[in-house]
Image: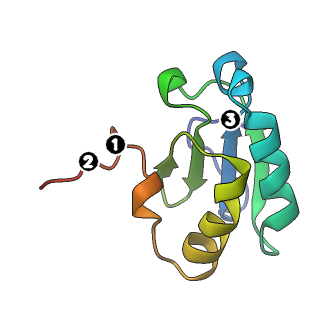
Amino acid sequence: MSCLGKRVDSKRQILVCQYINCQSQGSAAVLKAFQAAVPEGVVVTGCGCQGQCNMGPTVRVLPDETWYCRITPEQVPQIVEQHLINGKLVSDLLHPRWHPRFY
């Protein structure tokens, strides 16, 4: 499994960076929280660097191409409920590089 957009059976996937910077900011706990909380049919994968080291831990949802940044284990239930179950992005957690806001 690559972090570069390759999908397995076009299922929804959660990629949680496990590279050095993200790990130092708690990405292992974020990965564990997603593994415990995701709905059936969603694949959770720890992956290598996604190139967003200054915004870690980084979480990417495929095939949606939604990027969340600076995620904590406490925020995982909100992403699961709001995004994965109800189909609404968690706007406060979106990565500003991939999801810029215009004011």
| Image quadrant assignment for residue 25 | top right
The number of callouts visible is: 3
**64 versus 47 height, above or below:** below
Crowding near the residue tagged with mark 2, few <14, some 14–19, many ≥20 C-alpha atoms within 10 Å: few
Q: Residues within 10 Å of mark 1 (few under 14, many from 20)?
A: some
Q: Residue at x 66, y 27 (%)?
A: 22
Q: CA distance from mark 1 to mark 2?
A: 5 Å
Residue lying farthest to the left in this orientation: 103
Quadrant occupied by the C terminus: bottom left
- Tell which of 56 and 62 is nearer to you: 56
Q: Residue 94, position in %: x, y? A: 43, 52
In screen coordinates, is 24 left or right of 35? left
Task: Quickly name the residue at label 1.
Answer: 96
**Res 26 → quadrant:** top right
The three-letter code of the residue at mark 3 reads: Ser
Q: Amino acid at mark 1?
A: Pro
Disc number placed over residue 2 in the picture, else none: 3
From the top left corner, tell me how far across and down residue 12 is, in percent: 66, 64
Q: Which residue is mark 2?
A: 100
- 10 Å crowding of disc 3: few (<14), some (14-19), many (20+): few
Name the N-terminal-most of marks 2 and 3.
3
Give the farthest residue toward the top: 20
Marks 2 and 3, how far apart in space?
25 Å
Q: Label 2 near label 1: C-beta < 8 Å? A: yes
Dot 1 falls on a residue whose secondary structure is loop
Look at label 2 and name its amino acid: Pro
Is disc 2 placed on a helix, strand or loop? loop
Q: Residue 7 shows which numbered tag?
A: none
